[in-house]
Amino acid sequence: MLLDTASLYFRAYFGVPESVRAPDGTPVNAVRGLLDFIDRLVKDHRPDRLVACMDADWRPHWRVELIPSYKAHRVAEEHPGGPDEEEVPDTLSPQVPVIEAVLDAIGIAHVGVAGYEADDVIGTFTARADGPVDIVTGDRDLYQLVDDARGVRVLYPVKGVGTLQTTDEAVLREKYGVDGKGYADLALLRGDPSDGLPGVPGVGEKTAAKLLAEFGDLAGILAAVDDPKAKLTPAQRKRLDEARPYLAVAPKVVRVAADVPLPEVASALPRAPRD
């Protein structure tokens, strides 16, 4: 089981009142909410291995170089020599080191790798897995990893960090008309304002799904743009052609990395607290 930790503690922070505090008065609502959620996950799903994946760099430079608008609206302060500072509620930032310390004390592995987002860490662990994987995330971007043949599912919190929706290929096809591999192409065509991804103007989710159903993948769609016999409206052909510079780089930004240099970790679920 892989946790997209930041997406979960953000949800916990907004789902648990700030009146939940440590004895010294420090807010610990995100800490408490996340730990309660992990406790429920372990009891309900009984994973053999568990890794909390962290954002060592929430806005990697290599992604920003390709699409400068990537998460730009969430930058609180730029740091040319290192990761930019993200806009985070004042009472949440101090809780992140506490979360890491508590995970250490419990014995739950947490992994972040410089220059990569948690999504990339999750993508690499998933690529290397020799068995089924449950990915717990509040970020739909990770739907691209869903793979029935390999037993890879996404457990998506529907309300706060309460009810979980199990997302497999059948769910993706019903909701979006694509499988896991197709979801990344759908996402980059549609765009995502929350991540600063412009998408192709005039191509929303339904149109993107129809294009993928007709032409298979992004490469097939671009080939259709060059084929006068392909079933594209004049407006679609024009918009897709004009978006070629974006479509040339967007796949590397949207698709999670699968080659992150991961450290060796003890991922076995602890049977007793370490400390």
Image: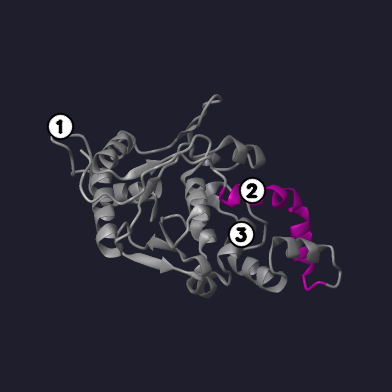
Q: Which residue is at the far right?
A: 228
Earlier residue among tags 1 and 2? 1
* Residue wearing tag 2: 252
Q: What residue type is labelled 2?
A: Lys
Percent coordinates x, y for residue 32 in the rendering: 23, 47
- Inter-mark Cα distance, 1 to 2: 45 Å
Residue drawn at x 61%, y 37% is 62
Tag shown at residue 24? 1
Element carrying mark 3 = helix
Write the start and end of the magenta stretch as one range: 230-258
Vertical comparison of 163 with 250: above or below: below
- Inter-mark Cα distance, 2 to 3: 16 Å
Element carrying mark 1 = loop
Q: How crowded is mark 1: few (under 14 residues within 10 Å), some or many (20 or more)?
A: few
Chief SS of the magenta region? helix
Residue drawn at x 30%, y 33% is 94
Q: Residues within 10 Å of mark 3 (few under 14, many from 20)?
A: many
Percent coordinates x, y for residue 262 in the rendering: 49, 41
- Inter-mark Cα distance, 1 to 3: 47 Å
Earlier residue among tags 1 and 3? 1
Q: Which residue is at the far top?
A: 81
Residue 23: within the magenta? no
Percent coordinates x, y for residue 79 in the rendering: 52, 26
Vertical comparison of 120 with 209: above or below: above
Residue drawn at x 48%, y 50% is 125
Q: Which amino acid does label 3 sit on?
A: Arg
* Residue wearing tag 3: 190
Residue 250: within the magenta? yes
User: 241 or 222, which is in the foreground?
Assistant: 222
Percent coordinates x, y for residue 3 in the rendering: 38, 51
Pick the quarter of the image with the C terminus: top left
> Nearer the viewer's eye, disc 2 or disc 3?
2
